[in-house]
Amino acid sequence: MKLIDKKILVGVTGGIAAYKTCDLVSQLVKNGADVRVIMTESAQKFIAPITFSALTGNPTSIHMFDTKENIPHIELVQNAHMLAVVPATANIIGKFANGIADDLLSSLLLAATCPIFFAPAMNINMYQNAAVQSNISRLKKMGIFIMEPDVGYLACGTSGKGRLPAPVKIFEEICNILEPKGPLCGCNVLVTAGGTREPIDPVRYIGNRSSGKMGYALAGAARKLGANVTVISTIEKPDYYLDKHIVVETAEEMYKEVLNNYAEQDIIIMAAAVADYMPINIQENKIKKTSDELIIKLKRTPDILSDLGLNKGDKILVGFAAETEELEKFAMDKLVKKNADLIIANDVSNPKIGFSSENNQVAIFDRTGCVTRSDLLPKTEIADIIINKIIDLDLFKKLKEQKGVDNHG
Ligand code: PMT
């Protein structure tokens, strides 16, 4: 009974694949979940509400004003662990991506604070339509879990991408979101991402070219292996679900948020490009062009990684070294000075890697003096290599023993 104590809302919209949702709902119920189905008006053309009521033992809701709840779109999602829309038509995808709430299901989607899962299914041309694709990527940016449709025979007689995956595959995906599996299961991982901005006056700042791609790739890689992931970032757009996402601007704000969230973390990965200096005085008004030269006095920012290193305990600390010369020497210096377990060195003078690029090439230094060098690869693959390197550390094995969880989750 994998899903005991889980309250799952299943939204059913008007697509031919709605018949498969019966099987999914049955599997969720058999595995202990308390399931409540919400259908759209047009879903009833494909399947009868009574089918879901019989399968779940709960009433099936369709309209805002026909449920026993006083404020159905709020009360139904309260304490829900997930809202899964299966199948999700182009219509519900478009409505949710644009904040439209004109029936019970679309209103519930806006009121939900639990993870939201969409399994789109439709004709291939509809699925590939630019409007649908742009709505899907908007949902991804909002942190909605989207399960790609399968490629295969479609009800309209054509073949291609748009088919609802088998209910057993959807069931596994939902279980994995609710109870992730993998070696990082039970571990709390904090990742910092993006470049800090240090204000000079109300319109100018000292910044850097970090896009947050490396940090978000690491967060995604950790989550894929079951970690509970917190991201503290200067960039606002995660395109997948994160357990916690905190947006900051300056090094001091990042420092404060990292410290606030430090105690419960097991692994901390500092991928952010944090400013080393900040203006001593931030001008209240925009600085005017009154002289040929302008001197801005700077002071050191807090060194977040170094301070964490002072209070490391059994936590795993991973830092980066963004260098333009003597990569290995400076990386080893940082490993020792900042008391990190791993330092990931990247040559940020190479325009093909490092800042903003889709790719990176790194050398990973550990405390034993061992160096692992990667090829030039997409940042997502570099992130997998780094996370696996963390999992190989003896300290990680110790951490798992302390948590009493076996290494394979
Ligand atoms: O974001 P992208 O565009 O994908 O680019 C990725 C990246 C190049 C930013 C990333 O791969 C990277 O190298 N991040 C670290 C950048 C950096 O600040 O490096 P550093 O060598 O200056 O700092 C060493 C370590 O100390 C880093 O882990 C940094 O996060 C940390 N630090 C630095 C300064 C400071 N005040 N506090 C810190 O904690």
Image (spheres, grey):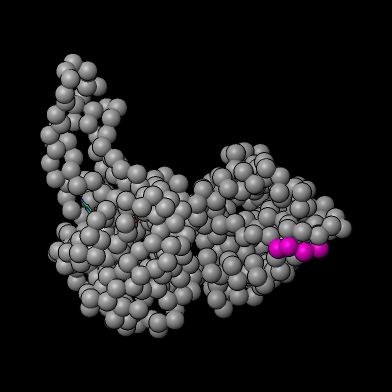
Q: Position of residue 181 (x, y in %)?
A: 48, 74
In the foreground, 397 or 325: 325
Is residue 230 visible from the viewing direction of this image? yes
Q: Is residue 201 left or right of residue 167?
A: left
- Please name the predominant secondary structure of the magenta segment in the image: strand
Q: Quadrant of ligand 1?
A: bottom left
Q: Residue furthest top?
A: 290
Picture layout, residue 183 above or below residue 264: below
Q: Position of residue 109 (x, y in %)?
A: 58, 48
At a point 59% along the width and 56% down the height, the residue shown is 146
At a point 18% along the width and 53% down the height, the residue shown is 303
Q: Is residue 380 left or right of residue 271?
A: right
Q: Position of residue 311 (x, y in %)?
A: 16, 65
Total numbered labels:
0
In the foreground, 62 or 323: 323
Q: Identify the magenta region.
A: 150-154
At a point 40% along the width and 58% down the height, the residue shown is 360
Picture layout, residue 407 above or below residue 286: below
Q: Position of residue 57 (x, y in %)?
A: 68, 66
